[in-house]
Image (tube, rainbow, N blue to C red):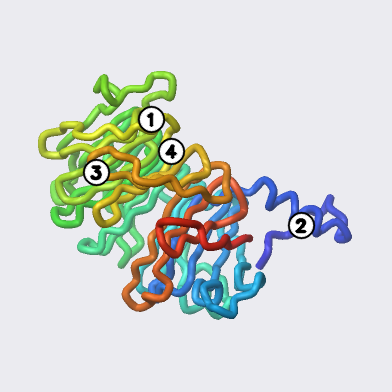
Amino acid sequence: MERAVPPTVPLGQMEVFQALQRLHMTIFSQCFSPCGKFLAAGNNYGQIAIFSLSAALSSEAKEESKKPIVTFQAHDGPVYSMVSTDRHLFSAGDGEVKAWLWAEILKKGCKELWCRQPPYRPEINALLLVPKENSLILAGGDCQLHTMDLETGAFTRALRGHTDYIHCLALRDRNPEVLSGGEDGTVRLWDLRMAKEVQTIEVYKHEECSRPHNGRWIGCLATDSDWMVCGGGPALTLWHLRSSTPTTIFPMWAPQKHVTFYQDLILSAGQGPCVNQWQLSGELKAQVPGSSPGLLSLSLNQQPAAPECKVLTAAGNSCRVDVFTNLGYRAFSLSF
């Protein structure tokens, strides 16, 4: 269902109200369906829109194909993060995480399966699935990582160490270990088996990474085996985790809000409209412009069940989700 028009807005002005909503929209989160043919996008109004990638990518696609097949009110506040399993879509907002069945969403039956609230009801900035534990990790405004058992819905532990907001999480699946980055300028590595912090990297204290004019906050991170890339206030930097050593400083002045490893590249986005493609050596291979003035999330659809829908999507400070069918150019945009 669409967000209700406020009672102060006459019904005749509904289109104007919705146009103003789109004008001031921010898309915080994205998530692909398990079949790979649909994309969920969550915005600052608490709405989740579901787009049909297969329809939008069809040779017979029309403008209507780039609009949501369904939009529903998921949270009262922004949808900061989403993740997906084979059956469920999980979404996070202010002080709550909700579960939705993909099968019901695609039938346009958008009733939540359950809602859970962690202790202290913090703003939840990041969700992370830990498949080996069948658990979900939540992190955000109370500076802790909360683990929720997906079988029982119970919160089983809280990992404490950060002294300010946590912005981002990444999984080292082999161990299993979790990396977290926060407003306090640290990246912390947690051993989930021992339920304790095992490594702390104070990124802003390394002179080559520090950019005091931007602050010390860590807004994005990703990991690949013994390597980590992170950025935010400090420069976007590739680190060797075992030695806690920065190996590559990427020459990007604007703070980065999302980063991911892709094949032999690192993709990043943040302030500005471009998706940046980096060689591991630090060379900027390409900057591909999108339609939003700033980007908050990148998502790669690599579901083997839908190779025809293998795309990169980028979203942020607008009502549009840019779709890249290859890394060289933006093919089109989906829109709320």
Q: Which residue is mark 4?
A: 141
As measured in the structure, the alpha-carbon distance from the residue carrying label 2 to the one carrying label 1 is 37 Å
As measured in the structure, the alpha-carbon distance from the residue carrying label 2 to the one carrying label 4 is 30 Å
Q: Is residue 87 visible?
A: no
Q: Amino acid at mark 3?
A: Leu
- Can you give x and y, in whole percent of width and height, for residue 194 in the image? 13, 46
Q: Is residue 174 left or right of residue 215?
A: left
Q: Nearer the viewer, mark 1 or mark 4?
A: 1
- Mark 2: give few (<14), some (14-19) or many (20+) Cα within 10 Å: some
Q: Amino acid at mark 2?
A: Val
- Can you give x and y, in whole percent of width and height, for residue 253 in the image? 42, 29
As measured in the structure, the alpha-carbon distance from the residue carrying label 3 to the one carrying label 4 is 32 Å
Dot 3 falls on a residue whose secondary structure is: loop
- Mark 3: give few (<14), some (14-19) or many (20+) Cα within 10 Å: some
Please give the label number shown on residue 287: none
Between discs 3 and 4, the one toward the N terminus: 4
Residue at left offset 11%, top offset 34%: 243
Q: Which residue is mark 3?
A: 280
Residue at left offset 84%, top offset 50%: 8
- Are discs 2 and 1 less than 8 Å apart at CB? no
Dot 2 falls on a residue whose secondary structure is: loop
- Nearest the eye: 277 or 146: 277
The quadrant where residue 18 appears: bottom right
Q: Which residue is mark 1?
A: 217
- Can you give x and y, in whole percent of width and height, for residue 107 in the image? 55, 80
As measured in the structure, the alpha-carbon distance from the residue carrying label 1 to the one carrying label 4 is 14 Å
As measured in the structure, the alpha-carbon distance from the residue carrying label 3 to the one carrying label 2 is 48 Å
- Are discs 2 and 4 less than 8 Å apart at CB? no
Dot 1 falls on a residue whose secondary structure is: loop
- Are discs 1 and 4 less than 8 Å apart at CB? no
Q: Is residue 16 visible?
A: yes
